[in-house]
């Protein structure tokens, strides 16, 4: 821990990045300086800001001389006590965080990619150097969730996390649910509104949600879950008709991040699911996020709110800065409450047992259903309901929507392969898991 200069009693922050999040942090720390001084016990100043392009117009007023393009002006400056990283991306952010921790600076980061891929290494480095590494903003933007998981809910054995942790996809799915839009149209609207990026891959393929789930699951189950451990499917294969059929069955479709522990095994997955329309998570719409935590003492608690955006994310970053600054000001030892030493085996998606929704286009003729039922029956997949939809008379095809009772994923995958080979099956339209 770096000692605060007792003469000026000021804690100095070096900010890496002055984009959406960095600008909010600069604004909040400047505008709230009197309140912050009162809370921390001394002033907290941003003394340097690293950017790529010093000449770029900024969303906030930047005091003269603060901007730099040389990371050593922050990372190697002994007067900087806290480094706030709001740059994003894996590199060079990871190198900068390592360097800051090695230099004995506390670190606050909003970077989910770095934390999901390298969290354990960085936490170890922070412990070794007796400094703090805080990352509340990396999951759920403004929603306080990592703090509660590591502090307030610590007395619980967490059994499950179910979360909607990507605002862009939740916006797209909300449009598909209530406005009958197709995926491409909803994505275009999300891009026009600035929710989705020009290259939307990270959001729509579930990569961003996968990073966040890896962080949540690591803290909740006190084990090391890396981004690569999370099974992942995106939302681009969903069609407007899936939303209509889901509604008829009493469900909505959401991109959910689910982590569950059972008998020492852990499952961690991100994919679209059907959830009952009366479930609390089904009502989380638009760009909002929500995380439901299930613990043995508390039961189920839902954390709900803005999962992104400049000021909500700033709220989480500033909260962490105040925590780190207060510790430094009080010269408290910075021991972490995070332990990731529990040994758990990851459960493969093929061992998942859940209910399924299967949409198939078939030739509209006698005997089709019997042949399909035989395939499912032979694999011990019990049918819960069958709806025949939207027959196309010119094509002589019909669409069947089948839901199953709880079945094993590997059997369902095998059934899909066998169904596809049937002459009367024109296309497997979609297949979705149901989360009750
Ligand atoms: P952003 O608007 O793209 O800003 C990134 C900033 O970092 C820019 O100021 C950029 O400099 C600077 N930067 C990037 N690479 C750099 C490099 N190699 N050297 C020096 N400066 C560099 O990003 P953001 O939306 O604020 O996101 C920042 C982080 O917060 C990311 O990890 C993101 O995942 C996380 N986050 C964002 C949100 C959100 O709502 N935006 C929510 C939660 C978490 P220039 O300005 O000169 O280009
Ligand atoms: N791209 C993210 C989302 C925002 O859509 O939720 C930052 O986490």
Image (tube, rainbow, N blue to C red):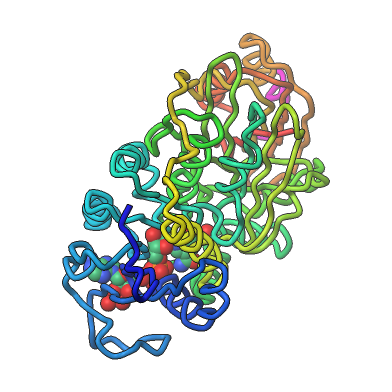
Q: Answer left or right for 47 relative to 211.
A: left
Does residue 26 lie above or below 91 as drawn? below
Q: Locate ligand 1 by image quadrant.
A: bottom left
Q: How many marks?
A: 0
Provide residue 154's location: percent of width, then percent of height: 62, 34
Q: Answer left or right for 421 relative to 58.
A: right
- Check residue 393 for magenta coloring: no
Does residue 368 lie above or below 9 as drawn? above
Q: Nearer the viewer, residue 342 or 73?
A: 73
Does residue 383 lie above or below 362 as drawn? above
Does residue 194 lie above or below 211 as drawn? below
Q: Answer left or right for 400 relative to 423.
A: right
Q: Answer left or right for 292 relative to 277.
A: left
Please give the name of the residue rendered at 69% of the width and 18% of the height, measured from the top-left corner. 373
Provide residue 45's location: percent of width, then percent of height: 39, 76
Range drawn in magenta: 363-370
Look at the image and tell me whether residue 110 can be seen: yes
Please give the name of the residue rendered at 19% of the width and 70% of the height, measured from the top-left corner. 73
Query: In terms of image quadrants, where is residue 425?
Result: top right
Please give the name of the residue rendered at 29% of the width and 75% of the height, measured from the top-left corner. 49
Provide residue 99's location: percent of width, then percent of height: 21, 53
Query: In terms of image quadrants, where is residue 93?
Result: bottom left
Provide residue 232's location: percent of width, then percent of height: 47, 38
Q: Nearer the viewer, residue 89 or 274?
A: 89
Q: Quarter of the image containing the C terminus?
A: top right
Q: Nearer the viewer, residue 393 or 9?
A: 9
Query: In terms of image quadrants, where is residue 10?
Result: bottom left
Look at the image and tell me whether residue 187 can be seen: no
Please give the name of the residue rendered at 44% of the width and 45% of the height, measured from the top-left corner. 211
- Check residue 365 for magenta coloring: yes
């Amino acid at each position: 821990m770096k000692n605060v200069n007792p003469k000026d009693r000021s804690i100095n922050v070096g900010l890496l990045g002055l984009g959406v999040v960095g600008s909010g942090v600069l604004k909040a720390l400047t505008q709230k300086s009197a309140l912050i001084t009162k809370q921390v016990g001394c002033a907290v100043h941003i003394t340097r800001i690293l950017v790529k392009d010093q000449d770029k117009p900024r969303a906030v007023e930047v005091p003269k001389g603060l901007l730099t393009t040389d990371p050593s002006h922050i990372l190697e400056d002994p007067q900087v006590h806290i480094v706030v990283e709001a740059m994003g991306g894996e590199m060079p952010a990871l190198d900068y965080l390592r360097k800051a921790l090695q230099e004995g600076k506390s670190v606050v980061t909003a970077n989910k990619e770095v934390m999901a891929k390298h969290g354990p290494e960085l936490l170890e480095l922070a412990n070794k150097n007796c400094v703090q590494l805080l990352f509340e903003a990396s999951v759920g933007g403004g929603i306080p969730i990592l703090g509660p998981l590591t502090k307030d809910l610590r007395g619980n054995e967490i059994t499950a996390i179910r979360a909607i942790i990507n605002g862009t996809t939740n916006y797209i799915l909300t449009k598909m649910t209530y406005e009958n839009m197709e995926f491409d149209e909803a994505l275009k609207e999300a891009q026009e509104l600035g929710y989705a990026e020009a290259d939307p891959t990270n959001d729509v393929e579930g990569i961003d949600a996968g990073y966040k789930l890896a962080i949540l699951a690591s803290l909740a189950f006190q084990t090391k879950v890396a981004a690569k451990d999370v099974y992942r499917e995106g939302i681009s294969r969903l069609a407007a008709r899936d939303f209509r059929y889901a509604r008829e069955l009493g469900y909505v479709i959401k991109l959910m991040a689910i982590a569950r522990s059972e008998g020492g095994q852990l499952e961690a997955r991100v994919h679209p699911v059907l959830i009952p329309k009366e479930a609390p998570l089904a009502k989380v719409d638009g760009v909002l996020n929500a995380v439901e935590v299930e613990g043995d003492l508390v039961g189920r608690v839902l954390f709900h709110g803005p999962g992104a955006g400049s000021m909500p994310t700033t709220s989480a970053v500033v909260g962490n800065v105040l925590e780190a600054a207060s510790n430094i000001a009080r010269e408290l030892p910075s021991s972490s409450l995070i332990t990731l030493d529990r040994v758990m085996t990851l459960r493969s998606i093929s061992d998942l047992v859940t209910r399924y929704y299967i949409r198939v286009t078939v030739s509209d003729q006698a005997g089709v259903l019997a042949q399909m039922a035989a395939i499912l029956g032979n694999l011990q997949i019990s049918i819960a309901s069958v709806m025949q939809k939207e027959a196309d008379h010119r094509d002589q095809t019909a669409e069947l929507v089948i839901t199953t009772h709880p079945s094993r994923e590997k059997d369902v995958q095998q059934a899909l392969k066998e169904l596809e080979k049937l002459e009367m099956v024109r296309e497997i339209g979609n297949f979705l898991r149901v989360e009750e």
